[in-house]
Amino acid sequence: MTRTTLACGVAFAALFAAGGALAQDFTVNLVNEPSSLDPHMQWNPDSYYVYRNVFDNVVTRDDAGEIIPQIATAWEQVSETEMVLTIRDDVTFHDGEPLTPEDVVFSVERITNPDFGSPQLGQFNSITGAEVTGENEVTLTTDGPYPVLLAQLVKLSVVPQHVVEEVGDEAFNAAPVGSGPYVFEEWDRGVAVTLSRNEDYWGEAGPFETAEFLAVPDASTRVANLRAGTADLIVSLDSDLAMQIENAQGVQVLRAPTERVGFMGMNTTRPPLDDPQVRRAAAMAVDREGIVAGILAGGEQQVGQMATPAHFGYVEGVEPIPYDPEAAAEIVEETGAGDTPMQFATSPVFDQRIVQAIQQMLSEAGFDVEISMTDMSTYLQKARAPEQTERPYFSFGRWSCACQDVDGVQFPLLHSSSSWSRVNDPELDALLETGRSSLDDEERLAAYTEVQSIVQDNAYILPLYQAVAIYGAAGELEWTPTANESLFLNRMSWSE
């Protein structure tokens, strides 16, 4: 049972005598189980929802989106390539060992080590050095000016060097040790992850005694669990499901526009999608307005670029490639693009109404497209397969960097050096490098304006919409969803 109060009268009296709140449990229904609990590996939502409560990051954002201290209490950009961090001296890991500046250095070096193979490497590979330079001081060095450094440190978790080196990466993922408000207890593979409250947390304590994150792929089942009281928070609702519970007793719907961009990826390295005309045909075949207004209908907004108004670097006035199914069909017929069977990769975490609609639109234009559904872990592996020919032709995705800067979206998806990219364009690479290296905001914005032009001219990727996160919650839950989609348990509470 969720929201379980302590039944023992003695404990009940003792809690209130001590001025504490009732101990309570909390159950979250995710779509999939986490693909990783190692914060330096995947940061897909189902992983991030869980491990973000186990680990502290270098810095974090408040509910208004402002960067605030966490493990680093202060920071100073002492030169174009050096940032000095002041590290807290009152934090302990869950095994009782102190968190030190050395752990911060180790964490930076781990995630930036190419041999470690972090999917997040493209977010941090501008960092070329990390060094303890004082009693509670760490200096980070970048390969040039890097204006996004602090925003990226929002999602850099600090891990304990002594544990990782003792047990190894695989064992650490299976039983992670952090310093956050919740302690890892158990991972019942394929079923649930259980966390318990860190009673010695240095910051704001979590309100729940335990938190269980269950994998519930079927959205209707998540809704049923919420209405039955066996779930307190459910994620990834669509507008239809939200309407079903909007006026239901004892539950509520919570929404937040996010920095996440829904998009259709195209593998530009595989024929026939190596032809920009064919890619343009695929883009013209997709009715984005129909998707946003007719399917989603949850407050989403069309975007013509891989950015949202929540990002720095969003370019005002960019018009999307127009919807023109007749012109798309002509190109497909002229090029013979419909003769190649192509897979459209997706995962249950995504809204399959959108995937099915896009597949139908592409088919009506003459493409031979078949949906390929896999679990999220397999989907991510295929997206980053070593050989481009092993990656799907089309894919549906919703990308967020949790940094609110377009560098965190466009560099990993479009720069040729990124393991996520299916694009190889030297001119585009140079502009993306300018965008992530200039400390002049105007120069950065000018670079990103050119990026949008090149991406659209070549139809490298098809931006669809700015996503809105829709959650179902118990009526008593007090919580404000944010643009970065973090489920911070210690920012939640029960109403009196």
Image (cartoon, helix red, strand yellow):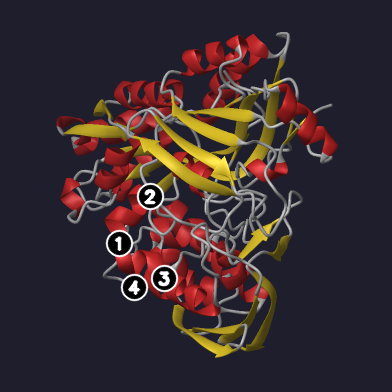
Secondary structure beneath dot 4 equals loop
Sequence-wise first label, 3 or 2:
3
Dot 4 corresponds to which residue? 113
Q: Is residue 486 left or right of residue 127?
A: right
Residue at 40%, 70% in the rendered image: 162
| Lower position in the chain sequence, tag 3 or tag 4 | 4
Whether label 1 touches label 2, CB < 8 Å: yes
User: Looking at numbered disc 3 in the image, what kind of residue is underneath it?
Assistant: Gln
15 and 324: which one is in front?
15
Q: Nearer the viewer, residue 269 or 89?
A: 89
Q: Work out whether 442 lies above or below 120.
A: below
- Mark 4 to mark 2: distance in Å? 22 Å
Q: Position of residue 121 (x, y in %)?
A: 39, 65
Q: Is residue 112 above or below residue 275?
A: below
Name the residue carrying label 1: 167
Label 3 crowd (10 A; few <14 / some 14-19 / many >=20): some
Of the two numbered discs 3 and 1 on the same chain, state the one appearing first in sequence.
3
Q: Which mark is residue 161?
A: 3
On residue 175, the disc is 2
Above-or-below relation of 423 to 211: below
Q: Could you give the CA–CA distance between mark 1 and mark 4, rounded to whole angstroms?
A: 18 Å
What residue is drawn where x is 27% and y is 39%?
378
Q: Secondary structure at mark 1?
A: helix
Relative vertical location of residue 327 with respect to residue 160 in this rendering, above or below? above
